[in-house]
Image (tube, rainbow, N blue to C red):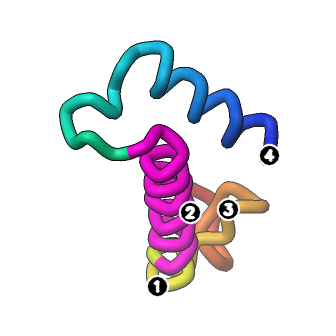
């Protein structure tokens, strides 16, 4: 994951994506990684709520 974070930071810097907010590239990279983590958790929580077992690719007890 450290490689991805560094690559993301470099890409943000290379494309000057930090210019709009005047925020350092490493802060933006951390923010985006945190967003990805939050999204992944939300998807997992949703799957639990609906009874989906993502490892099996089906709803608990029935084929999709």
Q: Whole-Å distance between the Cαs marked 3 and 4?
A: 26 Å
Residue 35: image tag: none
Mark 2 neighbour class, 10 Å CA radius: few under 14, some 14 to 19, many 20 or more: few
Residue labelled with disc 4: 2
Q: Quadrant of the C terminus?
A: bottom right
Q: Is residue 34 magenta?
A: yes
The range drawn in magenta is 24-45
**To which quarter of the image does residue 63 belong?**
bottom right
Determine whether the residue tagged by mark 4 lies in a helix, strand or loop.
helix
Dot 4 or dot 2: first in sequence order is 4
User: Which of the two residues, 9 or 46, is positioned nearer the viewer here?
Assistant: 9
Asked whether residue 57 is drawn in magenta, I would say no
In percent of width and height, residue 54 lies at: 67, 62
Query: For numbered disc 3, what is the local secondary structure?
Result: loop
**Separation of disc 1 and disc 3 at Cα?**
12 Å
Magenta segment, prevailing SS (helix, strand or loop): helix
Residue 51 found in image quarter: bottom right
- Comparing labels 2 and 1, the label whose residue is closer to the camera: 2
Residue topped by disc 1: 49
The extreme bottom residue here reads 49
- Report the residue marked by disc 3: 54
Upstream in the sequence, badge 1 or badge 3? 1
Q: Earlier in the sequence, mark 2 or mark 1?
A: 2
Query: Circle 2 is placed at which residue position?
Result: 37
The tag earlier along the polypeptide, 3 or 4, is: 4
């Amino acid at each position: 994951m450290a490689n991805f974070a560094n690559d993301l930071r470099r890409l943000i810097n290379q494309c000057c994506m930090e210019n709009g907010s005047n925020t350092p590239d490493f802060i933006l990279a951390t923010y985006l990684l945190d967003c990805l983590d939050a999204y992944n958790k939300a998807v997992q929580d949703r799957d639990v709520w609906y009874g989906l077992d993502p490892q099996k690719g089906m709803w608990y007890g029935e084929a999709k």
